[in-house]
Image: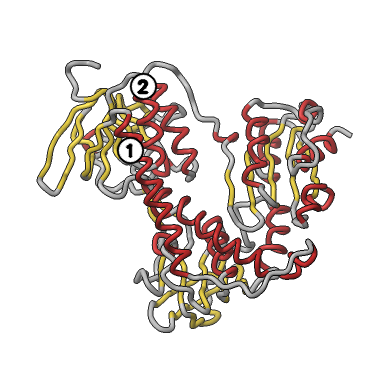
């Protein structure tokens, strides 16, 4: 460590991205401090990935045990199934406490200094930290910004945290409203619809765009809608937006046509979850002290090495990772970015391969993908000069899925016709979030379907769904 600085590296934000960066920095021999004003673990641990998956696990068991037709087909009979909402909520809260404690302890064990307070840049290689007892300043050779993101609440929607709320409050599962509106049909909206429908709530899902699940591959979204939405107590309103949402008993939602903005209807429901995405938490970071300007969407501009940019030029010794960069709003993407930033700090040039980072919605069944959708791949091909092809295989032909009687699902592979390189893989079905990693590795290594078709998969396993898709591509 240079004797001119308090630390080699100071990380502002102790979410999953900041945590991953800190652990890697210590392993590289850097004296490291991490600054956090809120909950250790950030959104993922406290208000996102961790508690939501606990709720999905518990509610998924309820759905499965109440599906008497499915159980009977396996030769199983279960008497009346009941659940305790409070106990399910406690399961999520207890998991949050455990993971938060594990994360904090791992930092302490490795010698990372944890500084509680609001951190921001105070000048070149300087950080100011505001705490309850006052303000302190520290110096660092390098600074990583990892401030994360917060839920986006569109204009006209009033949030009271009780009857109208975001995922931040939703993961607490304080109530089970008889009728709840969910605004948005992305990952957050889908997962909460899975939880609420399994626990007996009636749902109205409101999507402003002209199709449900707009960020997903179209073939996957159509199949997912047939399984996750249509058979359940979920009403959908597509191409319609919530012009105004007023908390209360009941919650009043004024609906309008998204294109024409004409008023359509007024809903009165018991509660409303606002699941309209997330925005970067980039206020009050002291960026102006170094002349750093946010982009038009308020993200911190970075290059491929995670170095912060100002006017297109690298700002020395300042890096940014995670949701605040606007690259991929995923916890594991933030962690990957943190490792890449540290690698570049120590002089090992490295960049993030975003195409090979997988994503998943933990519904029942699950949705996962990695790489490009068919539409995005086709656009890339038109620009670069190649044709694409797709191939599909179905869980209905998979022995393991049939044994489980969980045969709703599909795998879709998008690839270049000329070289066979896999550009994207999309899976809907049982354990899709686990299956996608084989495809992620294939995309990371830029493998071709011709080679993947010769891999040997254990039989009978769900992984053979991908095996079949690869083989169909080369027939």
Count all numbered tags in the image, as a single digit.
Answer: 2
Label 2 or label 1, whichever lies nearer to me, is 1
Q: Is residue 131 left or right of residue 472?
A: left
Quote the CA–CA distance across marks 2 and 1: 25 Å
Q: Which mark is residue 203?
A: none
Furthest-left residue in this view: 134
Q: Is residue 424 left or right of residue 323?
A: right
Does residue 108 lie above or below 397 as drawn? above
Measured as percent of width and height from the top left, residue 131 is found at 16, 46
Label 2: which secondary element:
helix
Does residue 434 lie above or below 192 as drawn? above
Which residue is located at x 29 percent, y 34 percent? Answer: 108
Q: Earlier in the sequence, mark 2 or mark 1?
A: 1
Which residue is located at x 67 percent, y 30 percent? Answer: 442
Q: Which residue in the protein does label 2 denote?
A: 345
Do the numbered discs 2 and 1 sit on residues whose CB atoms are within 8 Å?
no
Which residue is at the front of the view, 60 or 305? 60
Measured as percent of width and height from the top left, residue 25 is found at 36, 25
- Name the quarter where the C terminus is drawn: top right
Q: Which residue in the protein does label 1 denote?
A: 105
Which residue is at the front of the view, 113 or 424? 113
Near mark 1 (Cα within 10 A), the count class, few <14, some 14-19 or many ≥20, is: few
The quadrant holding residue 73 is bottom right
Label 1: which secondary element:
helix
Measured as percent of width and height from the top left, residue 410 is found at 75, 50
The quadrant holding residue 334 is top left
Q: Is residue 260 left or right of residue 126?
A: right
Near mark 2 (Cα within 10 A), the count class, few <14, some 14-19 or many ≥20, is: many
Which residue is located at x 74 percent, y 35 percent? Answer: 415
Measured as percent of width and height from the top left, residue 188 is found at 52, 58
The quadrant holding residue 154 is bottom left
């Amino acid at each position: 460590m240079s004797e001119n600085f308090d630390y080699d590296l100071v990380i502002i934000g102790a979410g999953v991205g900041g945590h991953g960066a800190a652990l890697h920095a210590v392993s590289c021999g850097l004296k490291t401090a991490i600054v956090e004003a809120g909950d250790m673990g950030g959104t993922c641990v406290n208000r996102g990935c961790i508690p939501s998956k606990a709720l999905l696990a518990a509610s998924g068991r309820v759905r499965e045990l109440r599906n008497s037709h499915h159980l009977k087909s396996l030769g199983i009979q279960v008497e009346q199934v009941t659940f305790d909402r409070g106990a399910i909520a406690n399961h999520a809260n207890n998991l949050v406490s455990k993971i938060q404690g594990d994360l904090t302890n791992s930092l302490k064990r490795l010698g990372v200094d944890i500084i509680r307070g609001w951190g921001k840049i105070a000048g070149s290689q300087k950080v100011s930290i505001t705490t309850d007892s006052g303000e302190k300043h520290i110096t660092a050779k390098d600074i990583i910004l990892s401030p994360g993101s917060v839920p986006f609440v569109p204009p006209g929607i009033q949030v009271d945290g009780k009857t109208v709320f975001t995922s931040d409050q939703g993961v607490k599962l304080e109530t089970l409203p008889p009728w709840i509106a969910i605004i948005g049909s992305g990952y957050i909206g889908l997962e909460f619809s899975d939880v609420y429908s399994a626990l007996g709530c009636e749902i109205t899902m409101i999507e402003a765009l002209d199709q449900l699940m707009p960020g997903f591959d179209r073939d996957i979204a159509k199949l997912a809608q047939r399984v996750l939405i249509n058979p359940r107590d979920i009403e959908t309103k597509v191409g319609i937006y919530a012009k105004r949402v007023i908390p209360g008993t009941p919650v009043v939602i004024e609906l309008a046509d998204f294109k024409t903005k004409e008023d359509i209807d007024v809903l009165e429901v018991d509660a409303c979850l606002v699941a309209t995405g997330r925005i970067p938490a980039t206020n009050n970071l002291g960026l102006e002290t170094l002349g750093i300007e946010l982009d038009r969407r308020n993200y911190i501009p970075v290059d491929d090495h995670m170095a912060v940019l100002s006017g297109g030029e690298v700002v020395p010794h300042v890096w940014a990772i995670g949701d605040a960069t606007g690259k991929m709003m995923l916890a594991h993407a933030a962690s990957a970015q943190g490792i890449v930033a540290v690698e570049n700090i120590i002089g090992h040039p490295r960049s993030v391969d975003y195409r090979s980072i997988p994503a998943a919605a933990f519904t029942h069944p699950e949705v996962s993908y990695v790489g490009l959708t068919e539409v995005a791949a086709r656009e890339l091909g038109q620009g670069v000069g190649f044709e694409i092809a797709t191939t599909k295989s179905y869980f209905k032909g998979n022995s393991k899925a049939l044994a489980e009687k969980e045969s709703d699902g599909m795998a879709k592979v998008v690839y270049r016709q000329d070289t066979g390189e896999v550009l994207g893989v999309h899976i809907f079905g049982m354990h899709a979030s686990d299956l996608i990693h084989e495809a992620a590795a294939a995309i990371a290594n830029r493998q071709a379907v011709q080679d993947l078709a010769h891999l040997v998969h254990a039989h009978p396993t769900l992984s053979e769904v991908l095996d079949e898709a690869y083989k169909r591509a080369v027939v």
